[in-house]
C-alpha cells in the first residue's frame, strides 16, 4: 500500500480539496461505492439493461470530506463519445486526486473492456507528473479473494500482469472487494436512506491510496475512437499472456524453493550475528553510561563555577549602572535648572506662563512649569492653555495638555480652550489643535457644568 502524499506539486496541492474519482464500466458498482463512501445516497445506481445509469459527469462537494466524482462507462457504443468527454472533464478539475478504477472479473479473468478503459484514461494523463491510481476489483466471492491473495498459486501475479500489460503507468495498489448480496442490482436514488456502510478495511484503503496533483492543462482528451480496436488487441494478448505466465509459474516455483533454502541458511547466520552484536551493544552501553556519568559531574561542577562568576559580574554591572544613572540624572537636572533660569532671566519684566503661551515661546513655558508646576493653571482671566489654543500654538498646547493642565477651564465669560480654538480661525495648526483637544476630552463651554 502506498503511503499518504501528493505526487506532482505538493506545495500547491496542500491547499486544494481532495477529489475522489471513480471510473468504471456499467455494472461495476462505482456509484454504489461512492454513496457508501459519502454515507448518503448522492449518486443514482442499480440494475440497468444495455447501459449504465450514469450518463454524464456528476460532481458532489461534501463539506469535510471532499469532492466526489462519478463518470459514465465507455462500453456503451451510443454514449461512448459523451462518456469519454465526461471522464476528460472529471480529470480537469485542478485538484488533488485519488483515482480508482472499479472493475469486475469474468470467471476470474480481466475483462478487455475494463483494460481498455484503464489504458485510455491513463494515456490521457501521461503528461501528469507522478500520475498514480488504484484499482478496486468488485463483486468477488470469498474463495476468489483467497485465491488471488494466495501467493503460492500465482493467480495474483497473473492478474497483476494482465492489468499492467500495455499500460504506461501500472496500478499502485489493488483491493479485492467481496460481493454483498444486499447490494447486487439494488436501486439507489438520491434522497433515499442508505442501507449499507463501507467496510472499514476498504475505507482505510481509499483514505491511504496514493494521491496526485492534476492540472487541467496536463490532461489530454480520452480517445474513445480507439476503444474497439484496443478491445480486440487485449482479447488476443490476454490469451498469450496467460499461457506464458503458466510456464513462468513453474520456473518461479523452483526459484522459490532455492530461495527458501537460502533464507534458512541466512537466518542461522543472522541469529549468530545477533548474539555477537548484542554482546558488543551491551559493552558499549556500559561504557557509554560510565562516560556520561563522569561527563555529567564535570558539567555540573563547571556550571556551578560559571554561574557564581556570572552572578558576581551581574551584581557589579547593576551597581555601576545605578551610579552612572544617578549621576546623569543629577547633571540633567542641574543643566535644565541653569537653562531655565537663563531663559526666564532673558524675558521682559512681568512675564508669566500666560504671556509666554501667547507669545509662542515653548522654551519659556517649559521653564515656568519646571520652576513652578502649579503655574500650569494660573489665570489672568485666561489660562495658558486657553491662550495657546486661541493662538493655535500647537506645540505649547501639546506641552500643557501632557503636563495635565485643566483642559476644560473656563475664562471669565465661560469659554474653554476648545471654544477659543473654534472661535479664531487663523493659524496653520488650527485644525490639529481642535482635533487634539477633542481627542483628550476637551469640551465646549456650553457642555461643561
Image (tube, rainbow, N blue to C red):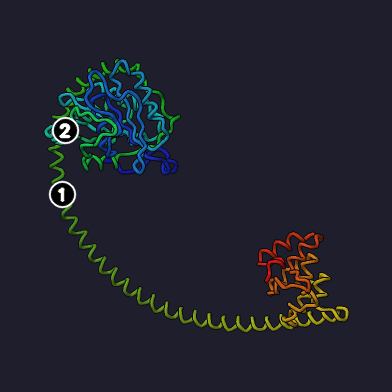
Which mark is on residue 301?
A: none
Along the line of sight, the residue nearer the viewer: 40 or 246: 40
Along the line of sight, the residue nearer the viewer: 41 or 50: 41
**CB atoms of marks 1 and 2 within 8 Å:** no
Q: Quadrant of residue 37?
A: top left
Q: Residue at x 30, y 33 (%)?
A: 42
Q: Closer to the camera: disc 1 or disc 2?
A: 2
Residue marked by disc 1? 267
- Is 359 on the left-hand or right-hand side of 150? right
Along the line of sight, the residue nearer the viewer: 430 or 3: 430
Q: Residue at x 79, y 66 (%)?
A: 390
Residue marked by disc 2? 182
* SS type, badge 2: helix
Image quadrant for the C terminus?
bottom right
Q: Residue at x 35, y 24 (%)?
A: 56
The local crowd at label 2, few if under 14, some if 14 to 19, many if 20 or more residues have their Cα within 10 Å, is few
From the top left corner, tell me how far across and down residue 184 is, in percent.
Answer: 18, 29
Q: Quadrant of residue 216?
A: top left
Q: Is residue 169 above or below residue 12?
A: above
- Is 37 on the left-hand or right-hand side of 158? right
Amino acid at each position: 500500500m502506498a503511503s499518504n502524499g501528493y505526487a506532482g506539486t505538493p506545495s500547491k496541492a496542500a491547499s486544494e480539496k481532495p477529489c475522489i474519482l471513480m471510473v468504471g464500466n456499467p455494472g461495476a458498482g462505482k456509484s454504489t461505492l461512492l454513496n457508501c463512501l459519502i454515507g448518503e445516497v448522492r449518486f443514482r445506481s442499480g440494475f440497468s439493461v444495455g447501459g449504465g445509469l450514469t450518463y454524464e459527469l456528476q460532481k458532489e462537494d461534501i463539506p469535510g470530506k471532499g469532492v466526489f466524482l462519478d463518470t459514465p462507462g465507455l462500453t456503451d457504443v451510443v454514449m461512448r463519445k459523451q462518456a469519454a468527454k465526461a471522464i476528460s472533464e472529471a480529470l480537469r478539475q485542478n485538484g488533488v486526486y485519488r483515482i480508482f478504477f472499479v472493475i469486475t472479473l469474468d470467471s476470474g479473468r480481466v475483462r478487455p473492456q475494463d483494460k481498455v478503459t484503464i489504458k485510455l484514461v491513463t494515456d490521457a494523463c501521461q503528461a501528469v507528473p507522478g500520475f498514480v491510481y488504484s484499482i478496486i476489483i468488485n463483486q468477488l466471492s470469498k474463495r476468489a479473494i483467497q485465491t488471488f491473495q494466495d501467493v503460492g498459486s500465482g493467480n495474483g501475479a497473473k492478474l497483476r500482469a494482465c492489468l499492467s500489460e500495455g499500460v504506461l503507468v501500472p496500478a499502485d495498489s489493488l483491493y479485492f472487494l467481496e460481493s454483498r448480496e444486499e447490494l447486487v442490482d439494488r436501486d439507489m436514488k438520491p434522497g433515499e436512506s442508505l442501507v449499507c456502510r463501507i467496510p472499514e478495511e476498504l475505507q482505510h484503503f481509499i483514505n491511504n491510496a496514493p494521491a496526485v496533483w492534476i492540472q487541467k492543462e496536463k490532461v489530454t482528451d480520452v480517445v474513445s475512437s480507439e476503444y474497439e480496436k484496443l478491445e480486440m488487441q487485449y482479447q488476443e494478448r490476454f490469451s498469450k499472456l496467460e499461457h506464458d505466465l503458466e510456464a513462468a509459474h513453474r520456473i518461479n516455483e523452483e526459484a522459490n524453493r532455492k530461495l527458501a533454502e537460502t533464507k534458512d541458511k541466512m537466518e542461522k547466520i543472522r541469529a549468530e550475528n545477533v548474539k555477537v552484536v548484542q554482546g558488543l551493544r551491551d559493552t558499549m552501553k556500559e561504557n557509554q553510561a560510565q562516560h556520561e556519568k563522569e561527563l555529567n559531574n564535570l558539567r555540573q561542577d563547571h556550571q556551578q563555577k560559571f554561574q557564581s562568576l556570572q552572578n558576581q559580574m551581574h551584581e557589579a554591572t547593576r551597581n555601576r549602572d545605578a551610579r552612572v544613572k544617578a549621576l546623569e540624572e543629577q547633571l540633567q537636572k542641574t543643566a535644565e535648572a541653569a537653562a531655565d533660569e537663563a531663559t526666564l532671566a532673558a524675558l521682559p519684566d512681568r512675564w508669566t506662563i500666560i504671556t509666554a503661551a501667547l507669545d509662542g515661546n515653548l522654551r519659556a513655558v517649559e521653564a515656568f512649569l519646571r520652576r513652578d508646576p502649579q503655574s500650569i493653571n494660573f489665570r489672568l482671566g485666561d489660562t495658558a492653555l486657553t491662550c495657546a489654543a486661541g493662538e493655535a500654538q500647537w506645540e505649547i498646547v501639546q506641552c500643557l495638555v501632557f503636563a495635565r493642565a485643566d483642559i476644560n477651564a473656563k475664562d471669565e465669560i465661560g469659554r474653554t480652550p476648545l471654544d477659543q480654538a473654534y472661535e479664531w480661525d487663523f493659524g496653520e495648526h488650527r485644525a490639529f489643535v481642535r482635533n487634539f483637544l477633542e481627542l483628550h476630552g476637551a469640551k465646549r463651554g456650553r457642555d461643561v457644568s
